Amino acid sequence: MRARISSVVLITALLSPGAARAQSDSSQVLTVVQRLFDGMRASDSAMVRSTMAPIIRFAEVNDRAAPPRIESDSVNEWLGAVSRSNHRWDERIYDVQIRVDGNLAQAWAPYTFYLEGKVSHCGVDALQLLMDPSGWKITQLADTRRRDNCRDVQK
């Protein structure tokens, strides 16, 4: 009997309007995140820029520095590099986890970065997004980078 009640409660919760909206929001967030990487792959900086809020921050830990330090990349310089990449960049995300609360979302995405078809590096992308009247926009992107034990997701 308890199993039936638990199943009914679970099904009711999953079919509630709040759950449907959360699933819809998660899908919309994933669409924006995927558009960012599709734009990178296409060397289309305008497409990439369309995913971003007017104010955005890129952050990373530069582990090549001694000692490692937190740095912030220039968005405009990075967008210029995207447009000059000549279809050589291919960042593939997988096992994406998305959390949404109202107008705030976070995406956690392991990735493998291919340069000219070969694994260059990998890590995790952590993106924060906010929703305004135009939709979800990326406000921050931070990532980790390593060169060993990278998953080849193209196979």
Image: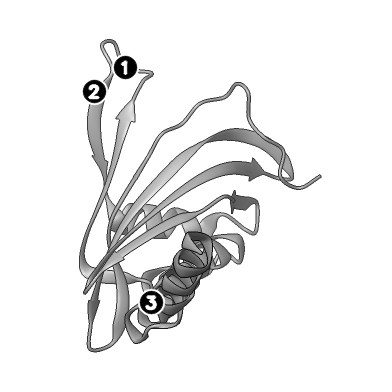
CA neighbours of label 3 inside 10 A, class few (<14), some (14 to 19), many (20+): few
Q: Residue furthest front?
A: 1
Reading the chain from its start, which is encountered first: label 3 or label 2? Answer: 3
| Residue 150 visible in the shown view | yes
Residue 51 x %, y %: 38, 72
CA neighbours of label 1 inside 10 A, class few (<14), some (14 to 19), many (20+): few
Residue 92 x %, y %: 61, 51
Reading the chain from its start, which is encountered first: label 3 or label 1? Answer: 3
Q: Name which residue lies at 56% across and 54% down.
A: 85
Asked if the residues shown at circle 1 and circle 2 are in contact, with their CB atoms under 8 angstroms apart, the answer is yes
Helix, strand or loop at label 3? It is: helix
Q: Residue furthest right?
A: 155
Taking 147 as reference, is 23 left or right?
left
CA neighbours of label 2 inside 10 A, class few (<14), some (14 to 19), many (20+): few
Which quarter of the picture shows residue 112? top right
Foreground disc of the pair 1, 2:
2
Amino acid, disc 3: Ala
Taking 80 as reference, is 113 left or right?
right
Query: 68 or 84: nearer the eye?
Result: 68
Amino acid, disc 2: Arg
Query: 49 or 135: nearer the eye?
Result: 135
The alpha-carbon separation of the residues under discs 1 and 2 comes to: 7 Å
Residue for badge 1: 65
The alpha-carbon separation of the residues under discs 3 and 2 comes to: 40 Å
Asked if the residues shown at circle 3 and circle 2 are in contact, with their CB atoms under 8 angstroms apart, the answer is no
Residue for badge 3: 19
Q: Name which residue lies at 57% across and 24% down.
A: 147
Residue for badge 2: 69
